[in-house]
Amino acid sequence: MAKNKHNQVHTDNQPGKADYPKVDYPIASLLPVGKENAIPTQELVKLVGCSSARELQQYIAQERKRGAVICSSTTGGYFLPVNRAEIAEFCKSLENRASNTFIAIQSAKRALNDSQEQEE
């Protein structure tokens, strides 16, 4: 993948300074900076050469595990955060999604317990 030196995370009072350790992040290097510039998932799938959105998500997950801060929007786009506020908004979105997932798990477990009690 081609590197794009113009797509860097901006933090605090350090405009233009990348906020990543010196590790190769091929997908992050393709992303625009700022939520308003988010690249749609399907466009990024084509750009990266993935066969599906799921494959792209797996590559993004790998980069995130290595430390890349790759944000996504609820409208289906990916971007690098322009500031701490965008990172905080992304974190809040993930927390809400995790909370909803946990609620669904609890509901399903209750149903399992109820059906087990009825079988006994």
Image (cartoon, helix red, strand yellow):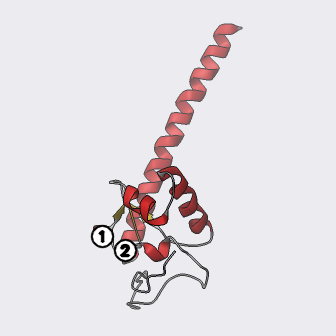
User: Looking at the image, which residue is at 61% across and 64% down?
Assistant: 62
Q: Quadrant of the C terminus?
A: top right
Q: Which mark is residue 107?
A: none
> Which one is in front, 19 or 107?
19
User: Looking at the image, which residue is at 57% across and 56% down?
Assistant: 58
Q: Position of residue 104 (x, y in %)?
A: 51, 35
Q: Amino acid at mark 1?
A: Asn
Residue tagged 2: 32
The numbered mark, 2 or 1, whose residue comes first in the sequence reads 2
User: Looking at the image, which residue is at 42% across and 70% down?
Assistant: 87
Q: Position of residue 20 (x, y in %)?
A: 54, 81
Q: Secondary structure at mark 1?
A: helix
Residues at discs 2 and 1 in contact (Cβ within 8 Å): yes
Q: Callout 2: few (<14), some (14-19), or many (20+) C-alpha neighbours within 10 Å? A: many
Q: Callout 1: few (<14), some (14-19), or many (20+) C-alpha neighbours within 10 Å? A: few
Residue tagged 1: 37
User: Looking at the image, which residue is at 44% across and 86% down?
Assistant: 5
Tell me where residue 111 sits by quadrant.
top right
In the depicted structure, whether residue 5 falls above or below residue 68: below
Q: Position of residue 28 (x, y in %)?
A: 48, 73
> Which one is in front, 116 or 66?
66
> Which one is in front, 66 or 112?
66
Q: Position of residue 27 (x, y in %)?
A: 50, 70
